[in-house]
Image: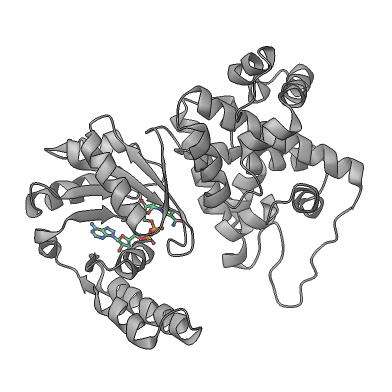
Amino acid sequence: MGTGIAQVAATAGWEVVVADTNEGILEKSSASLVKVMNRLAEKGKYAQEEADKILGRINFTDDQQYFENSDLVIEAIVENLEIKKTVFAAVEKIVREDTLIASNTSSLSLASIGASLENPSRFVGIHFFNPAPLMPLVEIIPAVQTSEETTNQAKDWVDSWKKLTVLAKDTPGFIVNRVARPFYGESLRIYEEGIAEFATIDWAMKELGGFRMGPFELMDFIGNDINYTVTETVFQSFFYDPRYRPAFTQKRMSEAGYLGRKSGKGYYDYAEGAVKPEPVKDKEVGQQILDRVLALLINEAADALFFKIASREDIDLAMTKGVNYPKGLLKWADEIGLDWCVERLDKLYHEYHEDRYRCSPLLRRMLEKNQKFFG
Ligand SMILES: NC(=O)c1ccc[n+]([C@@H]2O[C@H](COP(=O)([O-])OP(=O)(O)OC[C@H]3O[C@@H](n4cnc5c(N)ncnc54)[C@H](O)[C@@H]3O)[C@@H](O)[C@H]2O)c1
């Protein structure tokens, strides 16, 4: 992630220092940046001279002392609170008093990381998506300790890097990794209930729902280990709210080493010559699958708004730009009808008596008042 973020900042004209304790990683990072920039020049995105200039603005070091005069430090090291805390405490001693300090963490609370700083008011979450140079969205997450000035400065800088920023509360999964959970979780549940196989669920979500990738293709792409860990972390961080409970199917895939594309096998087989299973293209079953996943996604988006995790505009922007959803979920709810959403959720809730299907109070209230999310 650090390499990608460096490319984004350097492309926007910033002088960048990439620091890592591992020299081999620094060499890899440098080589991959040279490759990427040369490819972009070949494709005509930049003149070779411009590509070389961008590369020339990126420096590599294993010595944090280089941060001495930095305006901004973005940490993107291993997802381990204790290691991050140690690094932040050391970095704070090196940088200027007005240096803005940020973390790219996906799953740790910003408040807990900020607590390692003497002056946490200058600390904020700046969460990029992978790959950072290609994904337009960045979540800006102030911790309880963060000053408004810090949040605004971080947003201004990242905006000037030609990214789309959204503001999110310091809660598990922020916007995208929270709202997207049912895309994976409910699809896994549908499979576990024997309603359909992976290929059919993927077909329904793509063909009937307009999603760019099916949930199982996407989990294979992300890696079952990573996707499972995110789900488990969100589940634990929400004090074991059953709504986010992980699926055994994915846990077993991960335990077996069936991680997806990177291991050559996941829900699908990626070996050379392997034949992808055909979906059962039954429109009725497909529609049932889409309706169920979509109702839960909309419910999650509505609940994020209910708990003021972000504004309605930012929630929709986050899902369209952070994970390429075909439409913002709240806009989708308006179009499909709030009565449809509430009925679907209530039907599932009455059938299963499980909390994962509880309807957001906001959806119900808005339906009673005949309101829409937009206009
Ligand atoms: N990979 C993603 O898709 C993704 C997306 C958004 C955010 N993030 C977040 O970005 C961070 C990094 O993720 P990643 O996937 O790039 O991890 P990674 O394991 O690929 O890279 C982490 C790097 O940190 C270095 N490192 C470890 N300890 C260090 C120390 N004490 N000082 C300096 N460098 C140290 C390692 O050498 C390694 O190069 C995590 O907080 C993660 O949650 C990751």
Q: In this view, does 370 lie above or below 3?
A: above
Q: Can you tell which quarter of the image residue 56 is in?
A: bottom left
Identify the residue at image location x=69%, y=73%.
271
Identify the residue at image location x=61%, y=41%.
328
Give the side of residue 127 with respect to residue 352, left or right: left
Location of ligand 1 given as a quarter of the image: bottom left
Give the side of residue 52 with respect to residue 96, left or right: right
Q: In this view, does 170 lie above or below 26?
A: above
Identify the residue at image location x=56%, y=37%.
179
Q: In which quarter of the image is the C terminus?
A: top right
Residue 184 rendering spot, x and y as whole percentages: 64, 44
Tell me, yes or no, if residue 82 can be seen here.
no
Residue 233 rendering spot, x and y as whole percentages: 46, 38
Q: Quick one: 47 or 191, which is closer to the camera?
A: 47
Tell me, yes or no, if residue 198 can be seen here.
yes
Residue 281 rendering spot, x and y as whole percentages: 90, 52
Residue 229 rendering spot, x and y as whole percentages: 50, 45
Give the side of residue 270 with respect to residue 53, left or right: right
Q: In which quarter of the image is the N terminus?
A: bottom left
Identify the residue at image location x=34%, y=50%.
104
Give the side of residue 354 with respect to residue 318, left or right: right
Q: Is residue 260 above or below residue 11?
A: above
Q: Quick one: 260 or 127, which is closer to the camera?
A: 127
Q: How many marks?
A: 0
